[in-house]
Amino acid sequence: MTTGTYWQTVDSFRAFAAAHPDRPAVFSPDGTPATDLPEYQCLTYGELDAWSDAIAEHLSASGVGSGTRTIVLVLPSAELYAILFALLKIGAVPVVIDPGMGIRRMVHCLRAVEAEAFIGIPAAHAARVIFARSFRGVRTTLTVGRRWFWRGARLAEVGRTPSRPAPDRLPANPDDVLIIAFTTGSTGPAKAVELTHGNLAAMVEQVHSARGGVAPETSLITLPLVGVLDLLLGSRCVLPPLIPSKVGSTDPAHVVDAITRFGVTTMFASPALLIPLLAHLRTNPASLDSLTSIFSGGAPVPDWCIAGLREQLRPDVEIYAGYGSTEALPMSTIESRELLGGLVERARSGDGTCIGRPADRIEVRLLAITDAPVPTWSSAETVSGTRQVGEIVVAGPNVSTHYYWPDSANALGKVVDGDRVWHRTGDLGWIDEQGRIWFCGRKSQRVRTAQGDMFTVQVEQVCNVVTGVARTALVGVGLRPVLCVELEPDATAASVLAELRTRAREFDLTAPIEEFLVHPGFPVDIRHNAKIGREQLAVWARKELGA
């Protein structure tokens, strides 16, 4: 991939499609009901290029052009990629959001971008009509599927072949906005992140570098953006049946089928998919001989899941735990052999979770912990040294430097350093002597006590090893640290709590905890079932303690 502007990246896609028109680009379920394993349809690179040109031609004729903010609410499918590439070809700005946040929150967020075009499935258009005041700026619509009680064109009416060759486009500035992507809002208010043409080009190069410079043969795609990156690298992309807002409900048998049927070599998945996959492989062993690498993301993957996958897969399969966010993907990675080679034991002793070394061309620093804005780097107070915890801040070519909405997020989340902008992740950690980042917890979820701040992940990793504990969550009630406990099935609360108290007294880090409360089931994010709602647990703990 040639380093440069985004349009060079798109030109590379066009050139690849012209050179390999018959190469499969996207395998996706054909939409017919399946009693067992789904049937798939194949879209080639030549077909994807032509189809996206046809959609681009239609949208251009409908008034969609450079800079047009266009809401895209389409399920992972061949249609989604044809639409995304069409928008990128004409310079329009797709607006994407996680539907798992709930309809009212989603509508509230989408209202803020003042979109001028709307492309979606019927349920999305129904919401647009019901909440019409939130979408009054929309002038162009396109329905993917059946049109119910609204106007506008249907994707099926557009056709898959353009009527004339695509016009030449003027080169875009690398700093021009390419896409607006909302954060999930699972650990704070959702924000609209601006990703530029330069950001995407850097992401493609970083993903390529993370794979050792070897282009992927066949990729299993569970996150749409990863599919765009892999298509720009010439991969065959396989989309298993899944619901984006409920990834954890994906049938692992379908994942195994997709891997074996298409010879998948690499896959990106969150713990919500990897944990059920591990359970399935333990009861239904499968060789998965084609698989060479797994990249996890979206939420922290438990070390026991990584260890379990290593037992089920070939010894040479590489399993990477990744760290990133909507604003900066990727930020760091660590391979399972290094993680399991002594770093897990350190985590269980209170070091936090090792999330690896910074990704290619990513620079990481630590800010002194503060909830106040840090407008410029010259005004920043930094920390360094072994186990000195600070807020993780990153800068690099793939890092978003601006939020579209709300504007207050720019003041709290960005630090200007000359011509460079640092992104404040809101995560706390420290950097060891080998340059590895150790994640200690979210800044907003730190627990303030009379003895000083306590950090959630550091504490919980110490306590999670107790037999009978499914997971723990540290919260604060006033200045008291409280450990909420979710039990394994059939575990006895009294014996588990007794062992937890003994364990806590063994470490200075956890010794201040005197309150232990058993909770029937932690509130977690819908999509990944991994990000614990500690704010909700704190309210519950306060009531339990009568505070």
Image (tube, grey):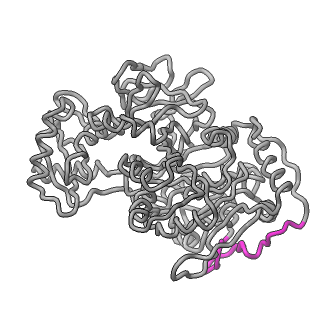
Quadrant that contains the N terminus = top right
* Magenta stretch contains residue 147: yes
Up/down of 19 relative to 391, above or below: below
Q: State the image coordinates of residue 223 (x, y, percent, origin top left).
A: 56, 56
Relative to 214, say whether 415 is above or below: above
Where is residue 103 drawn, in percent x and y?
A: 46, 64
Q: Is residue 442 visible?
A: yes
Is residue 269 shown left or right of residue 539? right
Which of the two residues, 81 or 19, is positioned nearer the viewer here?
19
Question: Which sits in the foreground, 365 or 185?
Answer: 365
Q: Position of residue 445 (x, y in %)?
A: 31, 40
Point 54% across, 76% down: residue: 37
518 or 333: nearer the eye?
Answer: 333
User: Residue at image x 46%, y 18%?
Assistant: 379
Is residue 74 toward the left or the right of residue 250 in the image? right
Picture mark count: 0
Task: Tell me where residue 236 sits by quadrant.
Answer: bottom right
Left or right, residue 307 beside residue 423 = left
Q: Main secondary structure of the magenta part?
A: loop
Residue 331 among those drawn in magenta:
no
Please give left or right for residue 365 compared with residue 76 in the image: left
- Please state the extent of the stretch shown in magenta in the rendering: 143-163
Residue 475 seen anywhere in this rendered image of the structure: no
User: Residue reaching furthest right?
Assistant: 164
The image shows residue 325 at horizontal and vertical percentages of 50, 43
Residue at the (26%, 42%) spot, across then down: 460
Q: In the image shown, does 25 or 382 lie closer to the viewer? A: 25
Q: As displayed, is residue 290 above or below residue 476?
A: below
Picture residue at 81% right of the left edge, 41% below the top: 171
